[in-house]
Image (cartoon, rainbow, N blue to C red):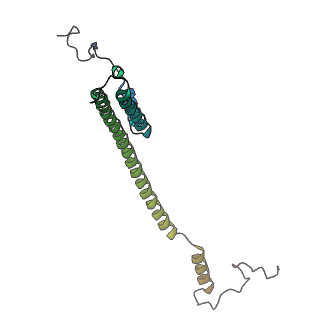
Amino acid sequence: MDSDGGRLDRPKARRRSPLPRWDPEAFGKASERIARFLGTGRFIAWMTAFVTLWLLWNILAPPRLRFDPFPFIFLTLMLSLQASYSAPLILLAQYRQADRDRVNLEQDRKQNERSIADTEFLTREIAALRTGLGEVATRDWLRDQLADLRQGPDGGRSAPRPGGHGEPRSSEEPDR
């Protein structure tokens, strides 16, 4: 058993590792910066200049100063080493971008669901308001009702004269 008696309510003490520790987020950001640089015209131009200078030096320099003769094995090794490091860095940057895209897509989907729910709610509210307005007395309905009351039950034979009781006077009639 452990020195703490095998207790499960306490985390184990951290063991020291001989491997270096690094922050995965910082490493990911650095790999994205490198991958972004590897995909630029600037990188292609620098790499072309480097390879051209390498070849020119090893072809035109005096034989005693050449460090990589004709088959250029050391240059091949350097380019292979560069490719073996750049490919995983590019993949790491792509995975991180895919994770960000997935999170953004999920947030967009949730926002769209909220927008649809809000739209449906507002549609129901507008329908309820329209139904409620259908039961409200409108100006035309009130005019029709007043006209019916003026005509009275006898078909309008005993309708009051304009300016009589219960009807507003027109502005043309003089005050009495």
The quarter holding residue 22 reads top left
Q: Is residue 83 visible?
A: yes
Position of the C terminus, as image quadrant, is bottom right
Q: In the image, 92: left or right of 6?
A: right
Furthest residue toward front: 62
Furthest residue toward top: 3
In front here: 77 or 129? 77
In front here: 20 or 175? 20
What residue is shown at x 23% (from left), y 17% (from top)? 8
In front here: 11 or 18? 18
- The picture places residue 171, in percent across and down from the top left corner, at 77, 79
Q: In the image, 14: left or right of 113?
A: left
What residue is shown at x 37% (from left), y 32% (from top)? 51
In the image, residue 143 sits, relative to residue 99, either above or below, namely below
Position of the N terminus, as image quadrant, is top left
- The picture places residue 111, in percent across and down from the top left corner, at 41, 48
The quarter holding residue 68 reads top left
Furthest residue toward bottom: 157
What residue is shown at x 41% (from left), y 54% (from top)? 117
Q: In the image, 168: left or right of 59?
A: right
The quarter holding residue 18 reads top left
Q: In the image, 161: left or right of 45?
A: right
Q: Is residue 32 visible?
A: no
In the image, residue 127 sits, relative to residue 170, either above or below, namely above
- The picture places residue 34, in percent across and down from the top left corner, at 39, 32
In front here: 137 or 15? 15
- The picture places residue 47, in percent across and down from the top left corner, at 39, 34
- How many numbered discs, if any? 0
